[in-house]
Image: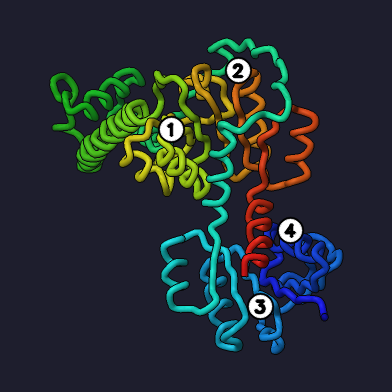
Amino acid sequence: MSQPEFIIFGATHIGIKLARLLSAKAARVRVIDRLAAPLDPPAGWEYVSNDFAVPENVKDASAVYVVTEQESLNIRIALAVRSVSAQVPIIITLEQSRLGRKLARHLERFSFISPSELAAKQFVDCIDAPSPDPSSHIAPAQTSDAEISLPRKIDPLVAYAVSAAGAMVCLATIYFHYAEHLSWIDSLYFVVTLMATVGFGDISLKESSDLSKIIGVLLMAASVTNTAILFALVTDSLLRHRLALAFGRRRIKARNHVIVVGIGAVGFEVVEELIRRGEKVVVVDNNPNGRFMPAIYAQGVRSVMGDARVERTLRDAGLLEARALMSVTSDDLTNLEIALNARSLTPQLRVIMRIYDSTLAGSLRERLDIHFAFSMSTIAAEALAKMVDQK
């Protein structure tokens, strides 16, 4: 009996790991991508570089996987494969489960997985999973509030408005000093009273030249406009600061809750899975206008806006009273720093990390006692490989 052949569209992290898993089962694997060379050199599998062209012998494949990073491209490739063969099983990655279920009703022998949903379930399962080894005893970091306080930035538009007002004062003072033969201090005094529209009680432009009168009119109009803009910008800045306090920059009072850091596609799935399981959730993100934040607010989930790499933000999220922390941002080093900071504050805390690099995840388990570090691409690849045996 000949070896089964599998075709994988997409030399992504998921595609490469899937190719390794399938080739380990004594299967022939072909990976197709636009890249001139794959992310990792082929080992037991074949690589083909083209514009995702469907091979003519696709109908002879045991299954076709479509795992590129573009969902619309995944659907297009799946439809192209189905137009060539009506029988070959097609499995794609698709974050939008609702759309995937609709496609499955219209396409024969078609299935999909959502990597975010799979990862979210495995992350949440780790909350109550037994730890392989006792947590390392790391001394809590002693960090003062002065060391962790973040400087408040001035709104650049406010700075521009203040600079414009200062420039008008300087230029007008110079003009009236020479045009109206005023001393420097009298000229500055006159310009300030003119811009504040409280002048003409002692110094006026009644006997001045037409040019001075025109400049005076323009200065008053520009000053009134700039003052209105400045007040509006200052009010907006204060209001945004107060809203940030209302929505996030406050200390959460909770116990036995789960902190989720990073509200992207994976983080949002994690939050929804936690809510379905009846867990108390606090989210941390540095973008109050993120894609998924409106849905977080609508569900009444408590949130802290800030950088979770800073101790103060973790404390505001109630880290000392939390039962677990999940760091699921899209950056490995950020997740690692957050995890280490959390463990330094509460050594016995259950910390769960999202890591792209599976080798790094293994090193964290061996060297840093972080036993719940998972690669989402590995989770997805293993799930895809198992689907072969279920068909």
Give, as a three-letter code, the residue at label 2. Answer: Thr
Q: Tell me the residue that label 3 is attached to.
A: 52
Mark 4, residue position: 17
Q: Secondary structure at mark 2?
A: loop
Task: Answer with the quarter of the image where residue 220 lies.
Answer: top left
The residue that mark 1 highlights is: 279
Q: Which residue is mark 2?
A: 346
Report the residue at 68% width, 84% height from top: 58
Badge 4, how many Cα within 10 Å: few under 14, some, many 20+?
A: many
Q: Earlier in the sequence, mark 4 or mark 2?
A: 4
Q: CA distance from mark 1 to mark 3?
A: 43 Å
Q: Quadrant of the N terminus?
A: bottom right
Mark 3 vs 2, N-terminal side: 3
Q: Nearer the viewer, mark 3 or mark 2?
A: 2
Q: Quadrant of the C terminus?
A: bottom right
Establish if 360 lies above or below 340.
below
N-terminal of the two: label 1 or label 3? 3
